[in-house]
Amino acid sequence: MKGKILLVVGVGVGYVLGARAGRERYEQIKRLSDKFWSSAPVQKQVHNAEDYVKDKAPEVVEFLADGAKKVVSQVAGSKKSTPARSVTSKAAPAKPAARKTPTPRTSTTAKK
């Protein structure tokens, strides 16, 4: 029993001390990352990347629009030139299920 109590106390103390050190370390890492992000060389590269994306965006839009038009025309052309087929048309045709004739319902009560 004494061992269990010491274990619980040890876990509690470790948690409290670790949480304090963890928070302080988190704040330190956050400060350093903010300082790095705000530095002139990083901001210069961020600005260069933004300019590049702004320059290339119209080309990407045009490329995607042309590709979409090509796909639509191919799909529309293939539908006009060949009859529509279902997905299962390549497999052997399914046999129709045998129809069961409904059995007449009879009353379960006996006639007198």
Image: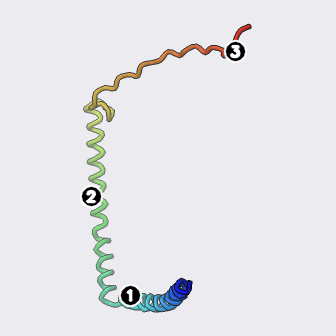
Q: Give how far across and how far down residue 83 sits, in percent.
A: 29, 30
Seen at 32% across and 81% down, the residue is 47
C-alpha separation, residue under disc 3 versus residue under disc 1: 86 Å
In this rendered view, identify the residue nearer to me: 38 or 58.
Answer: 38
Q: Give how far across and how far down residue 2 sits, in percent.
A: 55, 87
Bin the neighbour count of mark 1 within 10 Å (Cα to Cα): few under 14, some 14-19, many 20 and up: few
Seen at 70% across and 12% down, the residue is 110
Q: Residue furthest top?
A: 112
Seen at 41% across and 22% down, the residue is 97
Mark 2 or 1: the one toward you: 1
Q: Which residue is mark 1?
A: 33
Q: Which residue is mark 2?
A: 63
Residue 79 appears left or right of 108: left
- Which picture quadrant has residue 64? bottom left
Q: Which residue is mark 3?
A: 109
Q: Earlier in the sequence, mark 2 or mark 3?
A: 2
Q: Give how far across and how far down residue 53 sits, in percent.
A: 31, 71
Q: Amino acid at mark 1?
A: Ser
**Helix, strand or loop at disc 1?**
helix
